[in-house]
Amino acid sequence: MQTFSTATANGGILTIMSKVKSPSEKKRISLVKDRGNVYGECPASSRKNIRRGKQRGHMEVRRAANQELRGLKGSSVEADADVIESRAKERILALARSSFKKVPDAPLGEVVARKVKRRAEHATGRKSR
């Protein structure tokens, strides 16, 4: 679904005009295209925690490699070196597969529908004072 026309030069500034003109069509496209946070974290902390999660994953991989390769110190037998190196590679791959992965937010239409449903379930009318 193409919603934007081609960019045109307008006095040296590129502008992109939307082909969608009716407000209801714009709202429908917005509910499908835009995303909403359903994980429950503050957006500011999410921006920081994504970086921290990736950092922790990289640190785990480096630590695992160093732990395995420490066994090579003082070892002169080449067969031991090959075994330790292969164990290190296997451990690194296993950690890399299970490390931090970003998960996209839910479409805004689903988020709004979930909120409306929750409000309807919990709405018991006005509370008495």
Image (cartoon, helix red, strand yellow):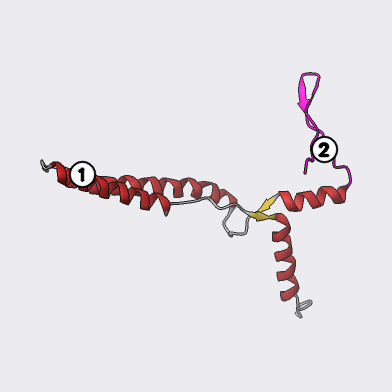
Residue 110 located left or right of residue 20: left
Q: Position of residue 122 (x, y in %)?
A: 71, 75
Closer to the chain start, of discs 2 and 1, is 2
The label shown at residue 18 is 2
Give above or below for 42 relative to 119.
above
Residues packed near mark 2 inside 10 Å, few (<14), some (14 to 19) or many (20 plus):
few
For numbered disc 1, what is the local secondary structure? helix
Whether the residues at callouts 2 and 1 have beta carbons within 8 Å, the answer is no
Please check the rendered image and state whether residue 57 is part of the magenta-colored stretch, yes or no.
no
- Which contiguous range is marked in magenta? 1-22
The secondary structure that dominates the magenta segment is loop
Quadrant for the N terminus in the image: top right
Q: Amino acid at mark 2?
A: Ser
Q: Position of residue 17 (x, y in %)?
A: 82, 34
Q: Position of residue 55 (x, y in %)?
A: 42, 45
Q: Position of residue 125 (x, y in %)?
A: 79, 77
Q: Which quarter of the figure has residue 6? A: top right
Which residue position holds label 1?
82
- The residue located at (31%, 50%) in the rendering is 90
